[in-house]
Amino acid sequence: MQDRTVHPHTPSSIPSDARALLQAIRDALDIPLPSIEPADVESYQRLMERRATHVLSMLDGILTVPAGGLDRDAALIQRHTDATPVTYQVWRPQSPGEVSAP
C-alpha cells in the first residue's frame, strides 16, 4: 500500500504557470476570519462566496475552453482578488489579561 502522506511532487516540480494559478487561487480564498460582530461575519461570508464563485467560474473555463494560458488566468483571478478587498474587522485573539469591551 502506498503511503499517501508524502506528496509525489515538490514545489519546484510544478510548472511555473500552474504554480502561479495555484497561488492566485490560494490568495483569493485565504481570507482572514471576521470579528464576532454579525455585520463582519456577513461581510466575510459575502466576500468568500464572491471570490469562490469567481474562482470556480475561472476553473470551469480553464477546464472546458483552455484558451488564454494559465498565467493569464492567474492574473485574472489576482485582479479580481485585488478588486474585492477585505473590508470587515478581522478577528484577533485577546492578549492574556485583556478585557473585552462591553
Image (cartoon, rainbow, N blue to C red):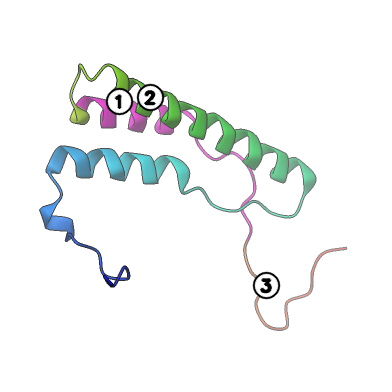
- Which quadrant holds residue 86? top right
Magenta stretch: includes residue 1: no
Q: Indicate which disc residue 63 carries.
A: 1
Start-end of magenta stretch: 72-91
- Binning the other alpha carbons within 10 Å of mark 3 as few (below 14), some (14 to 19) or many (20 upward) gives few
How far across and down, in percent of the image, does residue 69 sit?
Answer: 18, 24
Disc 2 residue type?
Asp
The quadrant of the picture occupied by the N terminus is bottom left
- Binning the other alpha carbons within 10 Å of mark 1 as few (below 14), some (14 to 19) or many (20 upward) gives few
Q: Are marks 3 and 2 in contact (CB under 8 Å)?
A: no
Q: Residue furthest front?
A: 1
Taking the image as shown, residue 85 lies to the left or right of residue 70, namely right
Say which residue appears at 20% left-offset and 16% top-offset.
67
- Binning the other alpha carbons within 10 Å of mark 2 as few (below 14), some (14 to 19) or many (20 upward) gives few
Cα gap from disc 3 to disc 2, whole angstroms: 41 Å
Q: Which residue is mark 3?
A: 94
State which tag comes first along the sequence, 1 or 3.
Answer: 1
How far across and down, in percent of the image, does residue 51 sit?
Answer: 49, 33
Q: Which residue is mark 2?
A: 60
